[in-house]
Image (cartoon, rainbow, N blue to C red):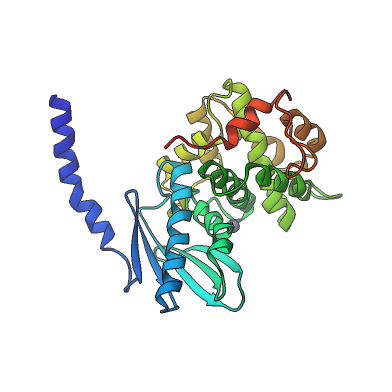
Amino acid sequence: MNVSIRSFVVLLAMAPCIHAKAAACPDRPVETLQIRSSTLCLFIDDPTPSRRQLLRTWAERSANIVADYYGRFPAPLAVLRLDSMDGSGVGGGRTMNESGLVIHVSVGRDATSQVLSNDWVLVHEMVHLALPEVGRRHNWLAEGLAVYVEGIARAQYGNREIADVWAEDRRSMPMGLPREGEGGMDQTPTWGRTYWGGALYCLQAEIAIREQTGNRVGLQTALQAILVETGGYGFERDIDEVLRIGDAATGTRVLEDLYQQIKTAPQAPDLGSLWSRLGVPKDPKTQPFDDHAPLAAIRIAITAPRKS
Ligand SMILES: [Zn+2]
């Protein structure tokens, strides 16, 4: 009973801090969104009320997808600037640390709620907030994580079909394999290696962590710990330190060992064998998954809906 009274007093004492953060948006945002204990300062250049409502819903849902995956939104305060462009799609996104964390995304003036519901860009950018800056040479880790986590987090939330996530992985991960003459991950800044080679590292790590822990924990546990212990994108950290933190959380050495294997030497795992061990068919959108495959339980656990 003493403990609960103390907790209540501590909570009361903390309340002004949380409120102070909410007041810290720069300039005057169109809206301030509370995502758990974080504040998202939303700037929208279009004054139309219906358009603002549409974009607000999208921003809030994307932030909740990322917060559910990480157990919290990955920054106490972030600015989100949504700029209009021609068309109906979602354009490029950028996440920057310019005296504060800022995400810029361009959105077509004719974008519908359906388009925004299927969007990957904003979740991808928000995932960038969860990893500290590890240096340009290791950009493959930042982009690979953003690519990999976007699909998994949206599937867990129910915002993306599980079959669609595996279909894209199966289709796109070959782009992450080294080409003739290419070196290790730290030496090859090509687009395919950076994005899909990085995502392949994440998938390999995910599987190895789950194999070594009896499918009890996965990459998600490592990434949550990295966020908590480093503070995420607003901070700079050495890549080895980041991977060590992730490994300590899962009680393995998977992230560090796999990095040592791929950092300076090209590595081309047999993807055909990987998909068949996971039970992922050639076309997951039209063919059934093989739930008797040796790694089927791991595949199912990766995208299982979160119990929230
Ligand atoms: Zn990115």
| In-front residue for pair 142/42 | 42
> Residue 188: where, in percent of width, then height?
73, 53
Q: Residue at x 51, y 44 (%)?
A: 157
Classify 247 as above or below 196.
above
Could you say which is closer to the camera, residue 93 or residue 112? 112
- Left or right: where 280 falls relative to 143: right
In this view of the protein, which residue sits in the foreground, 269 or 70?
70
Provide residue 121's location: percent of width, then percent of height. Answer: 57, 60
Query: Residue lying furthest right in this view?
Result: 180
For the image shown, how many numbered marks are present on the structure? 0
Rendering coords of residue 138 (x, y %): 62, 50
Image quadrant containing the N terminus: top left
Vertical side of 44 occupied by 242: above or below: above
Q: In the figure, 44 relative to 23: above or below?
A: below
Tell me the quarter of the picture where residue 26 sits. Answer: bottom left
Q: Quadrant of the C terminus?
A: top left
**Which residue is painted at 83% across and 50% down in the image?**
179
The residue under the point 56% across, 26% down is: 252
Left or right relative to 290: residue 126: left
Quadrant field for ligand 1: bottom right
Residue plotted at (80% across, 32% down): 273
Q: Measuring from the top left, give residue 218's x and y in whole percent.
A: 56, 31
